[in-house]
Amino acid sequence: MKTLNFVLVFLIVASAVFYFYFKTRQFRTSQVFPIRKKMFASKAGMFLGTLLIAFGLNQLLLFNGTVTYVISGVFILLGGYVAIFNGKAMRYYNQFVQEETELNKR
């Protein structure tokens, strides 16, 4: 039980770090690359979804009660939706990053 809790806490911290990393990359990317900015925003959103899922699972392990189950379920469902939606968006935008780079080299 403690090992699983440690893994979930590590996943929460790692997801938060990657979320802030990709948000920073999004803001620091030049306005000439709008597709790349959207790709970084999608990557950040994917890690935000992972953070929500891990937080919901961690709460299920730590506390008992009906309210905890409902709130954790909401976190897990919302995190799953956010992660899947942003994963699809990232794959979509990733197709056009190379083309955008070549167009802006001229």
Image (cartoon, rainbow, N blue to C red):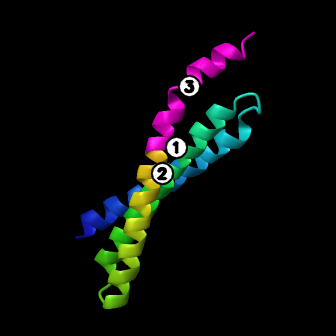
Residue 82: percent from left, percent from top: 47, 57
N-terminal-most mark, 1 or 3: 1
Find the distance from the CA under tag 1 to the CA under tag 2. 7 Å
User: Residue 52's quadrant in the figure?
Assistant: bottom left
Tell me, yes or no, whether the highlighted magenta stretch contains residue 104: yes
Q: Is residue 19 left or right of residue 87?
A: right
Q: Evaluate whether residue 14 shows in this view.
A: no
Q: Residue at x 62, y 32 (%)?
A: 36
Kindly identify which residue carries mark 2: 47
Residue 2: percent from left, percent from top: 26, 69
User: Residue 74's quadrant in the figure?
Assistant: bottom left
Q: Amino acid at mark 2?
A: Phe
Kindly identify which residue carries mark 3: 96
Q: Is residue 79 left or right of residue 57?
A: right
N-terminal-most mark, 3 or 2: 2
Task: Give the SS element for disc 2.
Answer: helix
Q: Find out whether the residues at labels 1 and 2 contact each other: C-beta distance under 8 Å.
A: yes
Kindly identify which residue carries mark 1: 43
Q: Find out whether the residues at labels 3 and 2 contact each other: C-beta distance under 8 Å.
A: no
Residue 50: percent from left, percent from top: 42, 56
Which stretch is magenta? 88-106
Q: Evaluate whether residue 66 shows in this view.
A: yes
Q: Residue at x 44, y 66 (%)?
A: 78
Mark 1 residue crowding within 10 angstroms, few (<14) / some (14–19) / many (20+): many
Task: Give the SS element for disc 1.
Answer: helix
